[in-house]
Amino acid sequence: MDAIMKQVGSFVAGVTSLVVSLIGLSVAVEVVFGAAPWGSVIGNISSIVADLNGGGFVGLLVLLILWSRVK
């Protein structure tokens, strides 16, 4: 059971790393080439941060938790 949990944890860490890398690449591509036809990555990130900011303390808490998970 312990080995399975380690594999699942490793898989989740790998997927998280991949997603964070793709977000960074998407932001760089949008800066260079402009927004894609299906949406703006920078605009979506800005709206998520604005929604968290509107949440007051809970939004700040969620933002801090997400930031700690990314680091």
Image (spheres, helix red, strand yellow):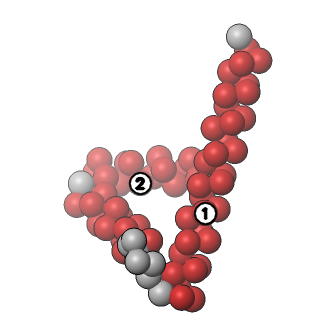
Quadrant into which the N terminus falls: top right
Q: Residues within 10 Å of mark 1 (few under 14, many from 20)?
A: few
Q: Mark 2 or mark 1, which has the lower sequence index?
A: 1
User: Which residue ends up furthest to the top in the rendered image?
Assistant: 1
Could you tell me which residue is drawn at 69 percent across and 36 percent down? 11
Tell me where residue 51 appears, x and y as whole percent. 27, 60
Eyeballing the image, is 11 above or below 16? above
Helix, strand or loop status at disc 2: helix
Q: Nearer the viewer, residue 14 or 63?
A: 14
What is the C-alpha distance between the residues marked 2 and 1? 20 Å
Mark 1 belongs to which amino acid?
Answer: Leu
Locate residue 31 relative to residue 43 in the image: left or right. right
Q: Which residue is mark 1?
A: 22
Could you tell me which residue is drawn at 67 percent across and 28 percent down? 8
Helix, strand or loop status at disc 1: helix
Q: Which residue is mark 2?
A: 63
Q: Residues within 10 Å of mark 2 (few under 14, many from 20)?
A: some
Locate residue 23 relative to residue 11 in the image: left or right. left
